[in-house]
Amino acid sequence: MRRADELSIGERAVIKDVDNSHPSAHRILEIGFTPGQEIELLNCSVFNDPLAFAIRGTIIAIRKKEAHCIHI
Amino acid sequence: MHSHIKSSDTNTPLITLVGPPNSGKTTLYNYLSGKKSKTVNYPGSTVNYSVSKILSKHEVNADILDSPGIISLVPTSPDEKVSVDTLYEHPKYGNPDIVIVTVDASQLSRHLYLVKQLIDSNFNLIVVVTMIDILKRNNKDIDIIKLSSVLGCCVVKFDGRNGDGIKELLEKTRDKIMGLAKEEKISPIAKFKIDKDKLLLSYKHIEEIENDVIIDKVLGKNGRIDIASLNENLVVLNNRRPFVKPDEKTLKLDKIFLHRYWGLAIFFIVMSFTFTAIFWIAQPLMDWINGGFENLSDFSSGLLGDNLFSDLISGGLIPGLGSVLVFLPQILILFLILEMLEDSGYLARGAMLVDKPLSLIGLNGRSFVPMLSGFACAIPAAMAARTIANKKERFLTIFILPLMSCSARIPVYALLVAFLTPKDKPYLGGIFFTLIYLFSIASSLVVAAIVNKFRDRIVKEKEDSSFIIELPAYRKPKLTVNLRNAYKNAKEYIKKAGPVILILSFALWALTTFPNYNPNIPDSDKLPAEEVNSLKNSERLSGSYAAMMGKFIEPVMKPMGMDWRIGVSLVATFAAREVFVSSLALIFKVTDDDETNHNSLLTAMEEAKSDDTGQKLFTTSTTIGLVIFFVFAMQCLSTIAISKKETGGWKIPILQIVVFTSLAYVLTVIVVNGLKAMGVS
Ligand SMILES: Nc1nc2c(ncn2[C@@H]2O[C@H](COP(=O)(O)OP(=O)(O)OP(=O)(O)O)[C@@H](O)[C@H]2O)c(=O)[nH]1
Ligand SMILES: [Mg+2]
């Protein structure tokens, strides 16, 4: 199964699930990364981390590790 | 019956404003209270609560409380905890009678999450929908009446740009307050931890509400349904939500500002421009202020004649104040640039760009904004660190904040840089100035990296570092608003620093003048008046109280290549750093000169000689040494106080005092002697 940190820039995917592998998994759900939601990887910072996603009409940046708990 | 306990015995109802970050709470608060709290295009601009009476013209007798942004009722960082606490158990205000929650219309599906939690917790709620203009720009609209009926609570619109909708909000608020008197107040249900299943269910419900109330204008255009939107609707049926594109302009700009390589280059250009501008743009304004104080000093000495009082006013207070106020333009420009950066929406991007490198040394991308505001003042900066959820990262950020060159150091550096800059190469000044800033940033990072090695011994906390930040849409900074805020900040700065500088200047003047006010100069009748005067001055100083105290600390100053006179000035800086300039001006007796204060102080520094060796006191090496001292020394009492408050103990502030003050001393000794050994005068 692929994860959100494996997306390439400009690629879209639908979230399948968010697992608990990171302490902020709950927060990620709370801000709207919920299953069924489509996201797009917009930008990544110089060191490939953090990643900026388009989600629900806004842009949210999260770390690679945090993106790793998002299954797509 | 109002169950909340208040310090005041009036029974004024309390209305608490909550809402997701950047949803327009403070904007609404300012409308209701007439206050001018800072509204910023950065999630996490408000980090503390503030309370005010609602303006009497609104005809609502209630207090309004503004709080930091929250995502949900389960807080993860101290700023969020402040908000949740004001909802449940505020020590002073108890819990609110009415809760107003702001919701960004263009972010409805995300922002209703908090609203649902508030409804489920039984709060007496008014929902205020903001940013409808942004929704309309995307050809959509919102059905407020429907939203109100599906949520089962009161919903009103509010436009933060012009205040439209405030009338209806006030009406509903009045109704609610009337209701308060009749019904028994229901206390909110205690904090709940929501599990994943419940959370997803809640979002499902919210998405249905969103589909109900958001009107897509494109869809119904010309009475025909176009294929694209029909497909979108099918998507919904397939349990997949349509993709909503963020603001187009923002996406385009981000392609540049968050570009892999250019992004970082632009970041460095923006930062170095900020620090260079402080020095270069301010010059003409500084000359102007300088001239003003010089005239004032001349005028008052002419008016008051030649006596003790005149000496106090025209030789002590006016030059003392002038030598600090001269740097006001630089401070104003710094504040203005920070304001514009905040308003543009760039700060959240900056935080994202530096998150990776900062996390390597135990900091967080969220440390960026506190560090940047540390260049204005460490006190609001330490409070801004509340947005960092992880305790270790937050404490480390607060720890290194004194190393950011705060605005109080601008006068000191400007004087020392002017001393170092060769007369024929004035452009070097700006470069030196920028170098000092870069040096202090670099040192703070090195210190952070070293302290980070001991982090587990200093703070016990689980490793749950995270970085999640919303990147707000870019906006053109509103120059008039920025100017007004910068002016307000600068005024605050003077109000705070002014009295301290005045009092200290006065104390120093007294200490350097007495008890030997009128020393006896032998053969004074044979010498020209000019010479008698200068002999008197130096005799008076060397017999003064300041000299007695200074001699006591001289052994400490010697290794740095400095004497007791600089020592006295340095001691004074532990009350406020800016005082350094005015105390040098006092001690090196620069009063009535044809030149301006600033320049005459430079000349006096140039001519000052060490008492016992007869060598020049201010040389390239000692001046650089002084810069180093000011970069590191922990000289500000208010910073110590805020460190204690924000970290909840004495451990961090004591560590700061010990580490930074000894670092300042040792490094200054090493640099001064090292430079001398290398042949630098
Ligand atoms: N276009 C538009 N902008 C608005 C509106 N209301 C507020 N703003 C802007 O949105 C930004 C955020 O507003 P604030 O009032 O600082 O938001 P806040 O909820 O207090 O934010 P935090 O304190 O960070 O949680 C500011 O730049 C406001 O000028 C509105 O109705 N329309
Ligand atoms: Mg606010």
Image (cartoon, grey):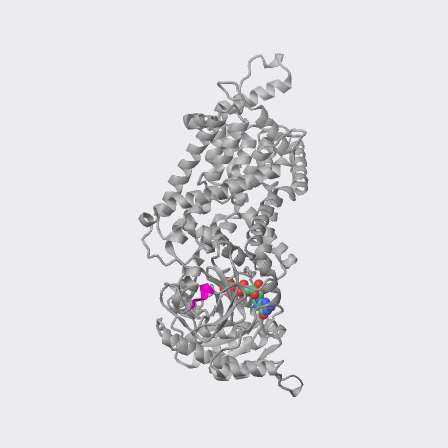
Q: Does the magenta stretch mainly form a helix, a strand or a loop?
A: helix
| Image spot of residue B60 (x, y percent) | 53, 73
The C terminus of chain B appears in which quarter of the rendering?
top right
| Image spot of residue B102 (x, y percent) | 51, 71
The answer to whether residue A5 is magenta is yes
Residue B93 visible in the picture: no
**Magenta region: which residues?**
A2-6
Q: Compared to B433, does B264 lie above or below?
A: below
| Image spot of residue B29 (x, y percent) | 53, 66
Q: Compared to B230, does B18 lie above or below?
A: above
Viewer-side residue, B469 vs B223: B223
The N terminus of chain B appears in which quarter of the rendering?
bottom left
Viewer-side residue, B160 vs B233: B233
Viewer-side residue, B370 vs A44: A44
Question: Hey, which residue is sitting farthest front in the picture?
Answer: A1
Residue B476 visible in the picture: yes
Instruction: Indicate which quadrant contains ligand 1.
Output: bottom right
Q: Compared to B553, does B120 lie above or below?
A: below
Question: Hey, which residue is sitting farthest bottom in the picture?
Answer: B223
Q: Image point 49% across, 81% down: which residue?
A: B209
The answer to whether residue B9 is magenta is no
Left or right: where does residue B136 sit relative to residue B613?
right
Q: Compared to B411, does B202 lie above or below?
A: below
| Image spot of residue B418 (x, y percent) | 60, 34
